[in-house]
Amino acid sequence: MERILTSETPKKIGEKVKLMGWVHNLRDHGKITFLDLRDKTGIIQCVGQNIPKLTLESVVEVVGQVVERPEKMINQNLETGRIELQIEKINVISVAGEMPLPLEGDGYDIDEKTRMKYRYLDLRRARMTHNIRLRSETTLWIRNYLSKNGFVEIETPILTKTTPEGARDFLVPSRLRPGNFYALPQSPQQYKQLLMVSGFERYFQIARCFRDEDPRADRAYGEFTQLDIEMSFVTQKDILTLSEELFTQLVGSIFPHKKITQSPWPRLSHQDARKNYGTDKPDLRKDKNNPDELAFCWILDFPLFTQQSDQDFFHGSGKAKFAPSHHMFTAPHPDDIGLLDSDPAKVRGLQHDLVLNGFEVGGGSIRIHDPKIQEKIFDLIGFSTKQKKEFEHVLAAFGYGVPPHGGIASGLDRFLMVVLGEPSVREVIAFPATAGGQTAVMDAPGKATPAQLRELGIKVSTVPKEK
């Protein structure tokens, strides 16, 4: 007899079936025991006599007949609430010990360290299972939507090169080239621009990105996932229109109970947003107590540069320079190109940020495709000759016919956090790092063995803590 899923049982009334899953609940009434069996599709009540001693969350195989419940015993809260399984045979496959954390309830009141240590158990929680399944449905929907609209999904390297892009890189030592290091990508920015030079025109990727930044509630430590999109021969308006259509249809398909406040989405200048709301991430919901309201908006016309001090990351020439407001590949507004020589602080960039309920959930720009303008931007942000050489591959590629192009990257973790009304992005990630940077379950980071370090030509010294 082949196993079936609990979701199939309502169509099997009067038939003998085999189910396999976890013991979700037990109610012992003497000779009769009620056992709630859970699998990936739901829960079904099983009833039997002389049931062996069981523990919650043990894995069992149950064989029995599917019957209708008496009218007064129907459970309207279960999809299988009109039926039950009369147990004829039960086999205990795997016995579960006492749970180190409760699995009932939403889990918000449980210490995060405990939840991360036993994340494989925490994920059995109904809320967490729901979140992860919705995440899967969301990414599948996006893939199908973009593929139907002429986009090619292309994976870009995870082991890449360290370049001065703003955040700290994660470095990976090279065994084959001792003394050299790879870097995990902060984003696929340079690769996706090179793909535009390659002529693909429409690219996307559900990309893993890595940044050694301090964690926040809306930002996971170390790694995150973004929907990465790049297009050739487009204007900024084209990018905004595509993104708006994608997310509007996504919400309607995957989150139909959510209501978008305004459509088309408001488009605010950076200056007006700061002036009228005191932030460039305004929450435009009409009722901020309504968790099902989604207020999207665009923030445009950002300054291309911000002032930087001598101590800032991009400093390379010994003098205070400008820092890119977005990143160094953002194109200046065509009306402001002349100001690059006379008054760079007044230059606007063709940057666009996507804001949802007061959170930045996406950002992008039209890119620079003129090598001369790119060189000028490098000069303005104070790049040394050595730092410029870090991007020589991009400038060289642009000498072989580069189309005008632009794109946007939307943070899937943060988007799902906001849409699902969760307090942290860690609630929508299967195995996130803790706020202290420790990887769930695996107890990482850890120490390398002396043999590993010798093979890589690395010596580790203890760095004293600052007082």
Image (spheres, helix red, strand yellow):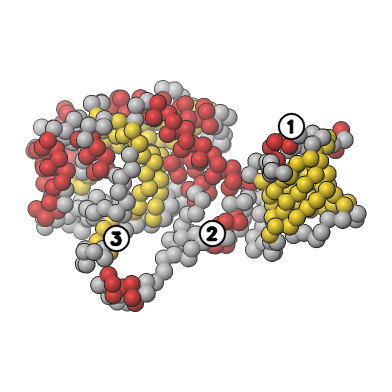
Which residue is depicted at the point 25% across and 26% down?
234
How packed mark 1 is, by other alpha carbons closer than 10 Å (few <14, some 14-19, many 20 or more), is few
Question: In the image, residue 192 lies at what x, y percent?
Answer: 27, 39
Instruction: Name the amino acid, label 1.
Output: Lys
Q: Secondary structure at mark 1?
A: helix
Which residue is depicted at the point 51% across and 51% down?
430
Is residue 377 in view?
Answer: no
Residue 8 or residue 144, whichever sits in front: 8
Is residue 208 in view?
Answer: yes
> Which residue was labeled with disc 3?
171
Q: Secondary structure at mark 3?
A: strand
Q: Earlier in the sequence, mark 1 or mark 2?
A: 1
Check the image and name the residue furthest to the top.
264
Quarter of the figure with the N terminus: top right
Q: Is residue 337 above or below residue 50?
A: above
Instruction: Name the amino acid, label 2.
Output: Met
> Which residue was labeled with disc 1?
11
> Which residue was labeled with disc 2?
116
Q: Earlier in the sequence, mark 3 or mark 1?
A: 1
Question: In the image, residue 97 lies at what x, y percent?
Answer: 69, 64
Alpha-carbon distance for marks 3 and 1? 55 Å
The answer to whether marks 1 and 2 mark residues whose Cβ atoms lie closer than 8 Å is: no
